[in-house]
C-alpha cells in the first residue's frame, strides 16, 4: 500500500526515515547491528517505497534485529544509495539500500538464499508490481518469505515457479490445520516464569522492538528471558517460540498462545517470558490484544505509545487514545497492572522525548522511557522495580 503521508501527515508518520527531524534521537549503535553468523541463510529484504515508514515495519525490524537470516541489503528505490541504519536510526550498519532486485543480486558473489517481503500493507495482499518482483526473485533462484495474509504457496503461479526453480515459499502467517490447534485449557497456571506483555495504544507502534530490546537487556543482566512472538516480523526474526495471532481462528487464539507460552516455559525454563503485543485493546479493528491478555494471563504490562501520532494508523478519523485511558482499560479488562510506558519517538526531537518522559512519569506515576534512545537500564529497572525477586543475588567473596 502506498504511503498517504502527504495527504494526511498525522496518520502515517515515518518511524524515523525521511520525515523525521534532523535532530532526531540517535540510536545506540549496537541495536542496529545485524550480528548473525555467516552460516545463516542470506536474505535481501524487499521494501519498495516504504523503508523507514510504518508499512515497512517488517523490513525495519529485520534490519534492527535478525537471528534467522543474514541480511545483505534492502530494496527501496526511493532510498537507494543510503545505509539502512542511517535511514532508520541515524547510525551506519553496513547494510545498503539498493534500487532493485538486479542490483541486489549482482553485488553478491553468489545468489542470495532468500527474498523477504518486508512490508505489511493494510490490504494484506501483494500489489501487481510487487508480484512481478517476487516472481523475478524466484526465477533467479531465491526462496521467498512472506508475512502477508495472502498465502503465496497456495497461488498456482507461485507454486509452479518455485517448483521449476527448486526453491521454497514460506508463508509466515499460514496457520496450522484446525485439527492441530487447541483451545485454552488453563495450563498457563503451571508456568512459573513472570509473564509481561508489551502492549500499545495503536498498531505498528514499536511493541516488538521494545520487547526485543528488553529481552536482550534482561538476559544481559543474568535474568533468563524468552520473547514469545505474536506477529509475522518476530517469527521472521527467528523467535524460538511464537505464533501469528491474526492468522488464527478466534476460538483458538487464546489456546494457541497458551500452548507456545507453556512450551517456552518447559523448553527454556526462563525467569521471565515477554509476550509481544498486537494492535491495541481499545482499537475496534483488532481483537488480538484481548486474546493476548486472556491467553497469556500476564502478571504485568508495559505500554508503548507514540506521542506525536494524532490519529490511529490507517484510520484518519480515529484519534489516538491517551496512555491514561488505555491503562485504565487494560487494568479493567484483565487481572494485571501496567508497570511502565515506553515511547515511540517518531517525529520527536531528543528534547521533546525527554520532556514527554518527564511529563508522563509525573502524570501517570509509573516509569517512562524510550527503548531505542535511552539506556537499557531504565527499561530493565522498570521490570525489577515491580519484581525485585528477579534481581541476581550478588556473589559473596570467600573470606
Image (spheres, rainbow, N blue to C red):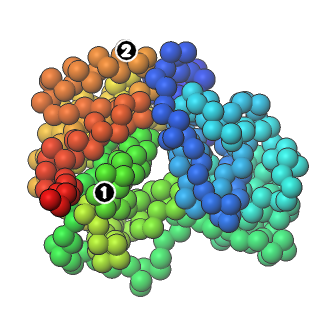
- Badge 1 local density, few (<14 within 10 Å), some, or many (20+)? few
Up the image or down, 27 lies above or below 43; here it is: above
Dividing the picture into quadrants, the one containing residue 182 is: bottom left
Query: Is disc 2 in contact with disc 1, using a CB cutoff of under 8 Å?
Result: no
Q: Disc 2 versus disc 1: distance between alpha carbons?
A: 32 Å
Residue positioned 85% across, 47% down in the render: 107
Looking at the picture, does residue 115 appear above or below residue 203? below
Disc 2: which residue: 351
Q: Secondary structure at mark 2?
A: helix
- Front-most of residues 309 and 39: 39
Please provide percent x and percent y for residue 387: 14, 52
First along the sequence among labels 2 and 1: 1
| Residue 162 location (% of width, % of height) | 78, 70
Label 1 element class: loop
Q: Is residue 367 left or right of residue 345?
A: left
Closer to the camera: disc 2 or disc 1? 1
Which residue corresponds to the image point at 23% horizontal and 21% vertical from the top-left? 358
| Residue at far bottom of view | 179
Q: Position of residue 241 (x, y in %)?
A: 41, 68
Q: Taking the image as drawn, is residue 118 in sight?
A: yes
Which residue sits at x=25%, y=63%?
271
Residue hosting label 1: 222
Please state the horizontal and vertical placement of residue 150, each as a whole percent of the image. 60, 60
Per the rendering, the mark at residue 30 is: none
Instruction: Give the residue at x 53% y 68%.
Output: 174
Amino acid at each position: 500500500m502506498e504511503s498517504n503521508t502527504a495527504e494526511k501527515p498525522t496518520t502515517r508518520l515515518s518511524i524515523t526515515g525521511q520525515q523525521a527531524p534532523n535532530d532526531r534521537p540517535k540510536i545506540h549503535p549496537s541495536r542496529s547491528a545485524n550480528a548473525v553468523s555467516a552460516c545463516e541463510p542470506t536474505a535481501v529484504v524487499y521494501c519498495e517505497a516504504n523503508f523507514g515508514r510504518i508499512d515497512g515495519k517488517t523490513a525495519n525490524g529485520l534490519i534492527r534485529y535478525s537471528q534467522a537470516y543474514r541480511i545483505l541489503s534492502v530494496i527501496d528505490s526511493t532510498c537507494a544509495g543510503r545505509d539502512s541504519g542511517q535511514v532508520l536510526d541515524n547510525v551506519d550498519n553496513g547494510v545498503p539500500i539498493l534500487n532493485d532486485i538486479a542490483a541486489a543480486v549482482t553485488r553478491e558473489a553468489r545468489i542470495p538464499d532468500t527474498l523477504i517481503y518486508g512490508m505489511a500493507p493494510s490490504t494484506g495482499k501483494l500489489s501487481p508490481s510487487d508480484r512481478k518482483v517476487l516472481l523475478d526473485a524466484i526465477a533467479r533462484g531465491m526462496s521467498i518469505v512472506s508475512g502477508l495474509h495472502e498465502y503465496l504457496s497456495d497461488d498456482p503461479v507461485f507454486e509452479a515457479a518455485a517448483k521449476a526453480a527448486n526453491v521454497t515459499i514460506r508463508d509466515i502467517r499460514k496457520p496450522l490445520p484446525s485439527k492441530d490447534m487447541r483451545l485454552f485449557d488453563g495450563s498457563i497456571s503451571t508456568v512459573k516464569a513472570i509473564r509481561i506483555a508489551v502492549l500499545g495504544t495503536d498498531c505498528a507502534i514499536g511493541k516488538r522492538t521494545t520487547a526485543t530490546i528488553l529481552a536482550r537487556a534482561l538476559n544481559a543482566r543474568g535474568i533468563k528471558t524468552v520473547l514469545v512472538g505474536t506477529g509475522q516480523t518476530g517469527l521472521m526474526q527467528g523467535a524460538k517460540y511464537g505464533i501469528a495471532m491474526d492468522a488464527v481462528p478466534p476460538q483458538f487464539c487464546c489456546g494457541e498462545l497458551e500452548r507456545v507460552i507453556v512450551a517456552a516455559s518447559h523448553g527454556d525454563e526462563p525467569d521471565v517470558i515477554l509476550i509481544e503485543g498486537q494492535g491495541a485493546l481499545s482499537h475496534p479493528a483488532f481483537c488480538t490484544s484481548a486474546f493476548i491478555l486472556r491467553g497469556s494471563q500476564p502478571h504485568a504490562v508495559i505500554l508503548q505509545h507514540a506521542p506525536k501520532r494524532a490519529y490511529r494508523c490507517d484510520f484518519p478519523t480515529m484519534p489516538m487514545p491517551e496512555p491514561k485511558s488505555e491503562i485504565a482499560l487494560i487494568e479493567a479488562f484483565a487481572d494485571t497492572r501496567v508497570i511502565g510506558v515506553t515511547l515511540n519517538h517518531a517525529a520527536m526531537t531528543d528534547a521533546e522525548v525527554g520532556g514527554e518522559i518527564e511529563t508522563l512519569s509525573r502524570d501517570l506515576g509509573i516509569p517512562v522511557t524510550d527503548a531505542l534512545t535511552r539506556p537499557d537500564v531504565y527499561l530493565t529497572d522498570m521490570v525489577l522495580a515491580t519484581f525485585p525477586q528477579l534481581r541476581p543475588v550478588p556473589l559473596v567473596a570467600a573470606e
